[in-house]
Image (cartoon, rainbow, N blue to C red):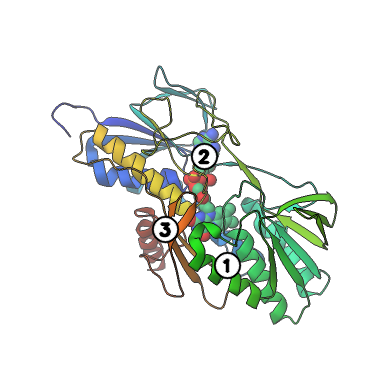
Amino acid sequence: MSSEREQPLRVLIAGGGVAGLEAALALRDLAGERVAMMMLAPGSDFVYRPMRVREPFAYSVAQRYPLEDMAREIGAELRRDKFKWLDSAARVVHTEEGVELSYDALILALGASLRPRFKHAVTLDDRRLDEQLHGLVQDVEGGYVRRLVFLIPQPTPWPLPAYELALMTARRAFDMSADVSISVVTPEDAPLAIFGSAASDAVQRLLAENRIETITSAHAETPAAGKVEIHPGPRRLNADRVVALPELFGPPARGVPKGSENGFIPIDDRCQVRGLDRVYAAGDATDFPIKHGGIAAQQADTAAGAIAALAGAPVQPSKFHPVLHAILLGGDRPLYLSAHVTGGHGSSSEVSDTPTWSPPTKIAARYLGPFLESGDRAALR
Ligand SMILES: Cc1cc2nc3c(=O)[nH]c(=O)nc-3n(C[C@H](O)[C@H](O)[C@H](O)COP(=O)(O)OP(=O)(O)OC[C@H]3O[C@@H](n4cnc5c(N)ncnc54)[C@H](O)[C@@H]3O)c2cc1C
């Protein structure tokens, strides 16, 4: 602990997802006992969301990790309650249960709210993806669904799951000798365009090899069940089923500024909330346009660096320089995609069928990746 500060800095982390856990791990590493952390989260478990896409195909269920155990290992107090509103002048968070929590620094890692964008489509909700899609996969296997359309809304939510689900469905149909035609309709100018041209071209080839049509730079509407209208065009598709990603919005958070588009929390390049002192935000809740677990983790690391310096740790806070890593499932082998992000698109785009980062976890997170990996190893002993 620094000589000027006798008490540890009280850090409140609202949210127990990727960003919240990564922030807690980073802070413990960077600031040690200079910080006393509390995590505020309503759920009992951290769920590894990327693996949920495999559930409808009965490969396995996504891993769950008890938050209580994780918080204990990190050395953070866990409070099972919800952030309700912020009194930034008093540095107090008010919770759903009516408790007042004081902080010296606050990290908002509340995730995004999910809402359906298309009236006549099944909107994916990863909390019940298996329930939503298991029947669809069976109907594809049985030849009852012959025309399937995946829709990606604008602004684009997480980039991967629509492509992974399309690929997995196409391969399952092929394995079962079922005849299905699959289209992905997306506002992106190319599939997974944010990963840059090398990665995006490889994904386009993989989709084409699996006879998946991609309709890019496209804005869709669903005027009636089984009907998709595409603009510019207009072009019309008929479908037995239409599956859509949800539209993402900023979380309800009274007392916290809202950005103009979809109410996300506006942050600067240090991940500090614009206009609020000692309040940081990370992950899907923020106004950074790319929603991705690896990005959530990098923002959490940036916020943790700034707070560690505030706590007197010998840390030079750095700016947020987004780098994207993703593992695309659904082909013969996973595809490892990477890019630096500049101006909303990937530059120095890389694609490989062997891991190019370590540990090669689906959510690339400096602290959370190795932490979950060692937890999995311990559980297997
Ligand atoms: C199907 C699917 C596949 C994906 N695949 C990948 C992938 O392969 N790679 C990748 O990098 N990313 C992937 N993503 C995206 C990634 O999961 C998200 O970007 C990431 O989870 C965002 O982390 P977060 O911490 O911001 O939000 P979340 O993970 O949503 O966590 C938010 C946390 O806040 C809590 N919370 C909510 N409201 C409150 C409140 N009022 N008070 C306190 N706590 C609250 C929630 O309970 C939760 O613990 C995928 C997403 C989905 C849905």
Type of amino acid under label 2:
Ala
Q: Which residue is mark 3?
A: 364
Mark 3 and 1 residues: CB-CB less than 8 Å, in contact?
A: no
* Residue 232 relative to residue 311: left or right: right
User: Which numbered disc, 2 or 1, marks the residue that appears first in the sequence?
Assistant: 1
Q: Residue at x 64, y 78 (%)?
A: 209
Question: Mark 2: is the Cβ under 8 angstroms from ligand 1?
Answer: yes
Q: Nearer the viewer, residue 347 or 279?
A: 347
Q: Residue at x 49, y 42 (%)?
A: 288
* Residue 329 relative to residue 143: left or right: left
Total marks placed: 3
Which mark is in front, 2 or 1?
A: 2
Is 336 placed above or below 271 here?
below
* Residue 6 relative to residue 304: left or right: left
Q: Which residue is mark 2?
A: 285
User: Which numbered disc, 3 or 1, marks the residue that appears first in the sequence?
Assistant: 1
Outermost residue on the top side: it is: 90
Q: Which quadrant of the rendered structure holds the C terminus? A: bottom left
Outermost residue on the right side: it is: 224
Give SS at disc 2. Answer: loop
Residue 272 placement: quadrant: top left
Q: Residues within 10 Å of mark 1 (few under 14, many from 20)?
A: few
